[in-house]
Image (spheres, helix red, strand yellow):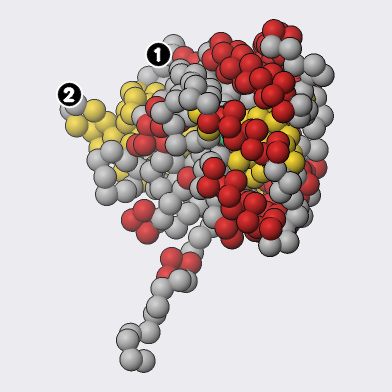
């Protein structure tokens, strides 16, 4: 990062504007004012950025080729937006499926994931008529067959495989290597065995293969290697069984820039071009004809850059010769990524968004953990003060969805902004919400 420079525009939603008073507007809404109106911490999403990113994916891969991965950020209104944008939707649990169905999301466009789907989750998915199930284990295939034996509708199934590809990312979010809890291993033959079983089963329709090698991937070469492994396997299974391979899903995982040092990250369009070209080559190499549909499922690269989190500065502690802590009213409960895997962000003050940021300080949360640090070496204006609203850009993915009530801090509200209009799409949790599931009367009452 250029020391002391204002936050890079490319880290803000594309609707970001600096007004004549130096204040940040997103989708026509004054960000500092949003904090004053709705309180902090607060998740704010630019609706135009969310929709633009869905469209970029559709342009890059084609209509019907892209699912939004709900795990990145899902609520009823987000599911509606994804439906309006004509996308498919990945869910990874019965809970995510419930939210999708409550939003009226068409079940036929839902893709159901999970390495340990319960009977209830599978039953619910089959009853709802989800479009595809991504099967992850032989135990799951047993369960599907038993449910269909009991009268459930036979699902369309993709086999999730681990292709033995190491993605360049944090080990907690790398999923494609052989040592993974997900899917069937290609190298030891279980992926092939599972595919042959599904292709021959009367309880399932075999659709093809799925693989997801990890998340926050900035080096596209890993996708090419995964495509080669999966298409080779698909070619073998097609020859062995005569079953057509309708679809190969190469997962999600495109990374996004979180800091000014990462601004050369590949764009959605580049990702599309590269992955499509590699896929077509690999299909030709391994004799896959007709060409299966190439599908992907993107989470972070749709939701991440569209969201910012707003906090209020509560205390500033300067330890001369050591560091300055700027403490805000949220932290690891609304964004666990820095504490969990050392994720880096930037910070800025929206009321003075164009100001230089010469002060290097640590933005700390309010939780009872020394590790509750949101931005270890944040650049901030020298005059940052108690009461300032502070934002962390690019926090639209895996913040709200991974939020907790640690230290019994109520979870923030979610606001969508568009055309100068903010609307609360998830209300802030209240203190009473925190005891809503507790037994409140004492024993014997
Ligand atoms: C199976 C699967 N698909 C898609 C995604 C979305 O990945 P990303 O948010 O990096 O695009 C994930 C995330 O971990 C995943 O596990």
Quarter residue 440 falls in:
bottom left
Q: Can residue 195 be seen in the rendering of this structure?
A: yes
Judge from the rendering whether residue 328 lies leftward or rightward of residue 266; answer left or right: left
The first of marks 2 and 1 along the sequence is: 1
Does mark 1's beta carbon lie closer than 8 Å to ligand 1? no
Q: Position of residue 288 (x, y in %)?
A: 75, 16
Residue occupying the point 72% across, 21% down = 239
Direction from residue 363 to residue 139 in the image, left or right:
right
Residue at x-position 63% and y-position 56%: 146
Q: Quadrant of the N terminus?
A: top left
- Location of ligand 1 given as a quarter of the image: top right
SS for callout 1: loop
Farthest bottom residue? Answer: 445
Can see residue 19?
no
Q: Is residue 425 above or below residue 312?
A: below
Question: Could you say whether the residue bearing mark 2 is in a helix, strand or loop?
Answer: loop
Residue pointed to by mark 1: 3
Observer-nearest residue: 95 or 132?
A: 132
Label 1: few (<14), some (14–19) or many (≥20) C-alpha neighbours in 10 Å: few
Q: Alpha carbon of mark 2 to alpha carbon of mark 1: how far?
A: 19 Å
- Disc number placed over residue 321 in the picture, else none: 2
The quarter of the picture where residue 51 lies is top right
Report if the beta carbon of the residue with label 2 is closer than 8 angstroms to ligand 1: no
- Residue 232: x %, y % from top left: 64, 16
Q: Position of residue 123 (x, y in %)?
A: 65, 58
Which label number is shown at residue 205? none
Q: Residue at x 69, y 24 (%)?
A: 240
């Amino acid at each position: 990062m250029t020391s002391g420079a204002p936050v890079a525009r490319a880290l803000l939603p594309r609707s970001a504007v600096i007004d004549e008073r130096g204040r940040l507007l997103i989708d026509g809404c004054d960000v500092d004012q949003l904090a004053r109106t709705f309180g902090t911490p607060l998740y704010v999403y630019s609706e135009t950025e969310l929709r633009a990113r869905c469209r970029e994916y559709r342009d890059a891969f084609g209509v019907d080729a892209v699912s939004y991965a709900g795990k990145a950020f899902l609520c009823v209104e987000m599911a509606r937006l994804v439906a309006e944008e004509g996308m498919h939707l990945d869910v990874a649990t019965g809970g995510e499926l419930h939210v999708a169905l409550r939003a009226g999301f068409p079940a036929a466009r839902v893709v159901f994931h999970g390495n340990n789907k319960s009977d209830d989750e599978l039953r619910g998915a089959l009853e709802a008529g989800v479009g595809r199930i991504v099967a992850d284990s032989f135990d799951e295939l047993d369960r599907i067959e038993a449910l269909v034996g009991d009268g459930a509708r036979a699902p369309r199934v993709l086999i999730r495989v681990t292709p033995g590809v190491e993605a360049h990312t944090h080990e907690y979010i790398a999923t494609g290597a052989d040592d993974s809890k997900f899917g069937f291993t290609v190298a030891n033959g279980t992926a092939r065995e599972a595919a042959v079983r599904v292709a021959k089963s009367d309880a399932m329709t075999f659709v093809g293969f799925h693989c997801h090698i990890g998340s926050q991937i900035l080096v596209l070469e890993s996708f090419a290697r995964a495509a080669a492994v999966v298409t080779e396997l698909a070619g073998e299974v097609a020859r062995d069984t005569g079953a057509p391979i309708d679809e190969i899903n190469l997962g999600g995982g495109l990374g996004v820039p979180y800091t000014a040092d990462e601004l050369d990250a590949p764009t959605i369009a580049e990702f599309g071009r590269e992955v499509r070209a590699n896929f077509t080559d690999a299909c030709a190499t391994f004799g896959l004809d007709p060409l299966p549909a190439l599908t992907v499922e993107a989470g972070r690269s749709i939701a991440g850059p569209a969201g910012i989190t707003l906090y209020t500065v509560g205390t500033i502690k300067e330890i001369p010769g050591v560091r300055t802590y700027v403490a805000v009213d949220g932290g690891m409960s609304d964004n666990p990524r820095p504490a969990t895997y050392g994720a880096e962000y930037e910070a800025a003050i929206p009321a003075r968004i164009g100001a230089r940021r010469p002060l290097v300080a640590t933005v700390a949360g309010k939780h009872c953990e020394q590790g509750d640090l949101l931005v270890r070496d944040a650049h901030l204006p020298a005059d940052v003060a108690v009461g300032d609203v502070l934002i962390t850009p690019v926090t639209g993915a895996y913040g709200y969805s991974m939020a907790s009530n640690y230290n019994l801090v109520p979870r923030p509200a979610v606001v969508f902004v568009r055309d100068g209009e903010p609307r609360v799409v998830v209300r802030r949790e209240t203190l009473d919400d925190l005891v809503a599931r507790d037994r409140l009367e004492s024993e014997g009452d």
